[in-house]
Image (cartoon, rainbow, N blue to C red):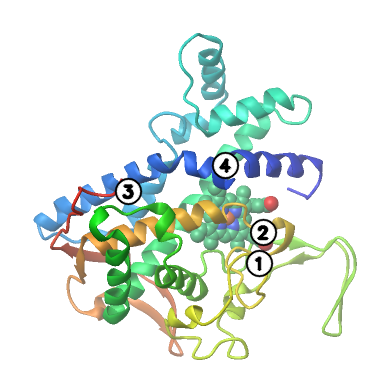
């Protein structure tokens, strides 16, 4: 969608109703509940000493955040029928769901001329596509790197355990402040970008770049993947070294051009606060509650190495969870 009036109003709806920190905090219980289900599922697998597919589980958990059973039933959400049923429900005296769809309908009633059901449908479908696989891939890659680097896994587990302490529960608000966990998340996003070329951009005016003249209306692909592995910007760029972020101010909010997993500028990903919460919570919970091992040797990970650069994992990450550890007051709250 070009960055015109329509895009602006959709983006405003998103910032106000989905990714605003206050709004995100009100939906914290929903995220914790989905992660509890994830942990319960992995616990059962650990009792059977069975490997789990981490990417698939993370994907299913994120679908849970979207209230799959009520507001975000994937197929229903895209149909007029779903929205019109919700509108009917709102006209009745029954209590409201108070979820993202309700917020969007409120927003469209306040801004009827510019924002209608068509925009709501675009948002529901686009957000599902934009937020689900990106976050589950990042979680899967983080777990891959942690399994390949047991000392990093141990450091992370120690940090999460210290934060859980005698409270016996993982607090989302606290894990966002854990330096090592956040360094692991950033390093995963540096080495394994979910959107390696960002989303295609287009020049509005003519641009001069390194001696080249790029005319208006040119489609631009930004190779953020290569930038994040450039030896001019990064020491030992092919190695997974979360420690590099402990010593640096570099963040993924678009200000550090050597690190752009979410892009930069006005078309930058609006889902950063949600993605950071979701990915951090899943990694912290998986690492805190279980010891992990690979079903066989590390070569089972089937990395696709070209010239020593790991590009892709050819098969899903299967790993065996062991020794379930319950917090003192039960699982995550
Ligand atoms: C780890 C998770 C995620 C990653 C790595 C990611 C990455 C990106 C990237 C690279 C872009 C394009 C930016 C550009 O071209 O400059 C983008 C756009 C976008 N993302 Fe995300 N994203 C993630 C999660 C999410 C979530 C959770 C949501 C929504 C809830 C979301 C919604 C969007 C939307 C709507 C756009 C298009 C924005 C526009 O065109 O104005 N993303 N994302």
The residue under the point 69% across, 44% down is 11
Check contact, mark 3 vs mark 4: CB within 8 A: no
Residue sitting nearer the eye, 246 or 91: 246
Please state the quadrant of the image where ligand 1 appears: bottom right
Check contact, mark 3 vs mark 2: CB within 8 A: no
| Residue annotated with mark 2 | 268
Q: Earlier in the sequence, mark 3 or mark 2?
A: 3
**Extreme left residue here?**
48
| Residue annotated with mark 1 | 254
Does the Cβ of the disc 4 residue fall within 8 Å of ligand 1?
yes
Quadrant of the snapshot with the C terminus = top left
Check contact, mark 4 vs mark 2: CB within 8 A: no
**Tag 3 secondary structure:** helix
| Residue annotated with mark 4 | 18
Q: Nearer the viewer, mark 4 or mark 2?
A: 4
**Tag 4 secondary structure:** loop
Check contact, mark 1 vs mark 3: CB within 8 A: no
- Residue 89 lies left or right of residue 298; in this view the side is right
The residue under the point 86% across, 85% down is 211
Does the Cβ of the disc 1 residue fall within 8 Å of ligand 1?
yes
| Residue annotated with mark 3 | 35
**Tag 2 secondary structure:** loop
**Extreme front residue here?**
166
The residue under the point 67% across, 75% down is 257
């Amino acid at each position: 969608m070009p960055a015109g009036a329509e895009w602006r109003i959709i983006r405003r709806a998103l910032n106000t109703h989905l990714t605003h920190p206050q709004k995100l905090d009100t939906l914290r219980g929903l995220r914790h509940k989905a992660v509890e289900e994830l942990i319960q599922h992995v616990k059962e697998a650990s009792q059977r000493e069975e490997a789990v597919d981490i990417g698939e589980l993370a994907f299913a958990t994120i679908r849970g955040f979207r209230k799959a059973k009520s507001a975000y039933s994937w197929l229903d959400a895209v149909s007029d029928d779903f929205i019109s049923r919700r509108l009917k429900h709102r006209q009745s005296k029954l209590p409201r769901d108070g979820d993202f769809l309700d917020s969007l309908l409120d927003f469209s009633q306040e801004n009827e001329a510019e924002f209608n059901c068509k925009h709501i449908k675009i948002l529901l479908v686009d957000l599902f596509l934009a937020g689900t696989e990106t976050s589950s891939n990042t979680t899967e890659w983080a777990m891959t790197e942690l399994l390949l680097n047991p000392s990093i896994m141990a450091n992370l587990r120690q940090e999460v355990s210290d934060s859980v302490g005698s409270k016996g529960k993982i607090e989302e608000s606290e894990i966002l402040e854990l330096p090592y966990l956040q360094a692991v998340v950033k390093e995963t996003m540096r080495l394994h970008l979910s959107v390696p070329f960002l989303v295609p951009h287009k020049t509005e005016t003519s641009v001069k770049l390194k001696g080249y003249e790029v005319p208006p209306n040119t489609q631009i692909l930004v190779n953020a993947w290569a930038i994040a592995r450039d030896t001019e910007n990064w020491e030992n760029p092919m190695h997974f070294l979360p420690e590099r972020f402990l010593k640096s101010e570099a963040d993924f909010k678009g200000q550090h051009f050597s690190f752009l997993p979410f892009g930069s500028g006005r078309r930058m990903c609006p889902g950063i606060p949600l993605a950071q919460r979701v990915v951090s919570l899943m990694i912290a919970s998986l690492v805190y509650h279980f010891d992990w091992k690979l079903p066989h040797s590390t070569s089972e990970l089937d990395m696709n190495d070209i010239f020593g650069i790991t590009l892709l994992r050819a098969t899903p990450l299967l790993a065996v969870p062991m020794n379930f550890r319950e917090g003192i007051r039960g699982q995550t709250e």
